[in-house]
Amino acid sequence: MDSSESFLKTTVERVRAYLDDNDFDAKYNDAYLVSHVIMPSMVDVQSRLALNASNNVLLRFNLSMVSGQESYVLPPCVGEILRVVKYNDLDNGLISLEWRPRGHFSVGGPVWILEGNMISFRPYPAQDDSVVIEYSSNGDMRPHYHDITTGLSDANNARLVTTTTFKFADTPTLGMRDKRLHAYAGQTLRLYGSIYHEERIISAYDASTRTATVSRPFTLSVTTNYSYEVCPPNSQAYVEAVTLASAIKLGTWRKVSQSHHALLIEQYRMAIKTITDNLSNMQARTGKSWTKDTPDNPDWRP
């Protein structure tokens, strides 16, 4: 792990170590690696996880429907939508209504359907309402890390505005800030405090004000400037998988030897197996399947 404990800086350091090439170090700076290698590698790894991990990490997006309005922009990271539901109260977790999709050519309408970067409801919503979209990520986001020691202007002084809102730097130290609507909804925001660090899931993001709203309050001091990072959950297994996917991509560009390339692929397979195993066994009651036979499952037999 890099001394900053940053996901991106750790990944960059490990990619350089796996390739161990002075010419490569001189040609590709950290910003280039993040934008052109690590970001697409994150998408590749997330695709493998979505395909193979039976208990993939699920995210939520709160959507405000407007009476008579058909289409709504989704976060760019939405991969597969599990369900669209309405909760009586988000704190008690009880679902009062679910919008179940039908076929595209259904006479009564598809209920909801994905069209490009939008979700469309047909028939149109009859009234203003709030729904929750539960989905798995496709990895499409622009991660970035910002060190407050390098940000001297007001625009770059990232700070915790309230316990649930954080303002991003205009120009991050590493990576780039995503300017798409809802770009960081569902992603992990990590604040680096002087004594301890905190992570929260971003529930909403306003690109015009660079302000992220998190699902649960931070306990760090408000109105304080913090180094921070926006990235996927920072598990060692995920870091290693993205690192090796990046090293393979760069190794292909650099035309590394066949034996070196084969070694990287073997290490990548091991890393993907590890993170897939972790995700498939996180929820012990359901284990490797949503419908696994257990004592409290009606299909279970002793």
Image (tube, grey):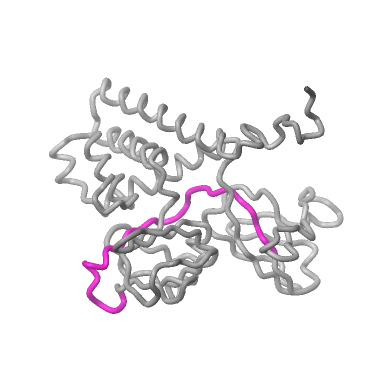
Residue projecting furthest to the right: 107
Q: Is residue 149 above or below residue 44?
A: below
Q: In the image, what residue occupies the spot 53% across and 64% down?
A: 216
Q: Taking 192 as reference, is 301 left or right?
A: right
In percent of width and height, residue 85 lies at 72, 58
| Figure quadrant of the N terminus | top left
In percent of width and height, residue 110 lies at 78, 54
Q: Is residue 147 magenta?
A: yes
Residue projecting furthest to the front: 195
In percent of width and height, residue 213 lies at 50, 69
Q: In the image, what residue occupies the spot 36% across and 58% down?
A: 197
In percent of width and height, residue 45 lies at 45, 39
Q: In the image, what residue occupies the spot 23% across and 34% down?
A: 19
Which residue is nearer to you in this view: 136 or 149? 149
Q: Is residue 78 magenta?
A: no
Q: Which residues are magenta?
A: 131-155
Q: In the image, what residue occupies the spot 40% across and 32% down?
A: 271
